[in-house]
Structures are given as structure tokens and as C-alpha cells.
Amino acid sequence: MLTQPYITFLSLTQTLSYTQTAQHLFITQPAVSQQIQRLESELKLKLVEYHRPHLLITPAGLQLADFLQRTNVQAEQLLQQLQTPKKAQKITFSATLSLSEFLVPEIIKKMSAQGDFTKINCRVGNTQQSLAAIKKGQSQFALIEGNFDKSEFDYQVIRSEPFSAVVSKLHPLAKRKSLSWSELLHVPLIVRETGSGSREILASLAYAENISLHDFTQIITVSEPVLIRQLLLQNVGVSFLYHSLIGRQLAQGELVELPLANGRTTHDLYLVYPKGSYFKQDYERWLK
């Protein structure tokens, strides 16, 4: 467990304020300053720089804070595991909205059937929110499909998933044998919100064709994959989705994959967890 100076420093990196840190820890502001100075002296490192009116954490301080956060979260998780009877174990994980539609039910079903946990909590959000939950210790792992900094986390690939442009069978483009990106720009584009992995993947596909999402004449931003599917079925524009989200609609011909040049990709789905996690073997076992 972390000693008081490290706890104070970690709080300071989150508040970037001596006053707020003191209030949060119920100590005086001079005590915060003294603990930070003592820690810098012991470590022989400059952790904090103050340029009025801003307090900045040095690169060394940021690395230390990241390590302390991961260590503290895992220590608390292990302690909870040791103190809790096996039959009363709980688990909390995050998942992106897209994966909550087709992958999360499968995983929760298996966890429930195994009977290892009496409490299973799933936090649903976009990729950025899911990764932030891991860093803050709010989730033990996350199921995501978006791009992320692989140097910050450990991860396992769950599987690869087709991702492509689709429209209603009633849309004029549904009958095309070939299609260019420039021809797609005048069709309403239904996309997920900023921070979504699906949006990032689409942006990367378009960028490879020298296209920006801003080049589309109309963009409809929708945070729920289920609503996007409904809009497509009502013949409102085009969207890019994982095939597992629309498998039945594609099989029944209600939705059609567009023959868009370089508009289809296969993207990895990930199980992501804290770097160097003590629980790595558990995550790998669940994945198998």
C-alpha cells in the first residue's frame, strides 16, 4: 500500500492544486507542500513545477504517478480478493457500446454459469471512457474495439471482426456493383460520437483515401449502435458497422454491404487491462 507522501503526490497530480489536494486529504496546504518537497528530496527527482498560475507535473512525475496509480489499484483489488470469501467475489469491467451489443452478453453468460462471482458489474461507454476506467481503478479490464496506446496497457486480442459500409436495401446505392469514396460524400453519414472506437476506425479508413469526415455534406452523430441500425433500416443514409451488430439484417437482406473501394476492414477486438497486472493470468484464463 502507498505511504502518505505518495498518496499526497498522486492526489496532487489529479487536482493540480495544493489547496484542493489539502481539502481532499483533510490536511493543511503547508503539509502538502512539505510532503512533496520531502518526496522530491528522497527520490532526487523534480516532480512538480509551478509556473504561475499553473502547476505542472514533470515528465518524471507523470511516469511515477502512472506507476503509483496502477500499483495502488491492484493492491486494493488483491486485498479485496484476499479478504472476501471465494463465494462472494465480485468483478467490474468496462465495454464499448458496440461490443456491449454482441460480445458482452456472451461473456456475462459464461461468467454467470461458472458461478465464480456473486456480483458482476459492466460499465458501458466509449473507448476513451473504458480506458479511463481502467486507469482510475473503476474497472478491472475493458472490452474495446478502438485504437489505443499499446504502450500504456497490456492486452489480448479476442478476435477479428469485419467492419464496412452498409445501407438499407431500399437505398439507390444498394444496387451498385462498385463505388468510390467521392460518390459517398453526398449521402448522409451516420457516425458514433467523438471518442468512439468505431468513429476512429472509420476516420482511419477515410484518411487512407484522402477523405475527412468533414468532407461529407451531412453528418448524423448517434451514440447508440442500436439506433444507428434502426436509422439504416429506415433508409436514412450510410454507416460503417461491425458485422456482428447487423448479422441478421445482412443475412435477411434488409441491409446491404456497399462495394466501396477500400471501404472494408477487419479490426481486432481487445481485452485490455493494466500494464504489468498481477491478475494477468486470470484475464488470459477468462479469454480462453
Image (cartoon, rainbow, N blue to C red):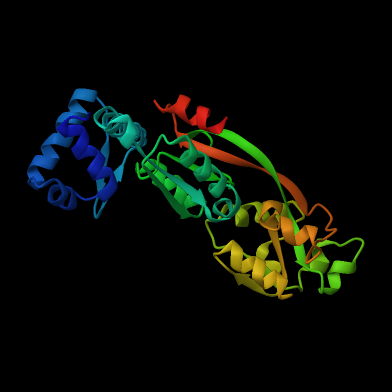
Q: Which of 60/213 is in front?
A: 213
Residue drawn at the location 90% of the way across and 66% of the way down: 176
Is 196 on the left or on the right of 184, as rendered?
left
Residue 31, compared with residue 122, is above or below; it is above
Q: Position of residue 11 (x, y in %)?
A: 23, 43
Name the quadrant of the C terminus. Answer: top right
Residue 254, compared with residue 242, is above or below; it is below
Q: Position of residue 170 (x, y in %)?
A: 82, 74
Q: Which of 112/98 is in front?
A: 112
Q: Can I make out residue 214 in this image?
A: yes
Name the quadrant of the N terminus. Answer: top left
Residue 158, compared with residue 193, is above or below; it is above
Is 47 on the left or on the right of 93, as rendered?
left
Q: Which of 179/209 is in front?
A: 179
State the image quarter where residue 173 is shown: bottom right
Residue drawn at the location 54% of the way across and 56% of the way down: 97
Q: Position of residue 59 (x, y in %)?
A: 37, 36
Residue drawn at the location 24% of the way across and 55% of the way down: 53
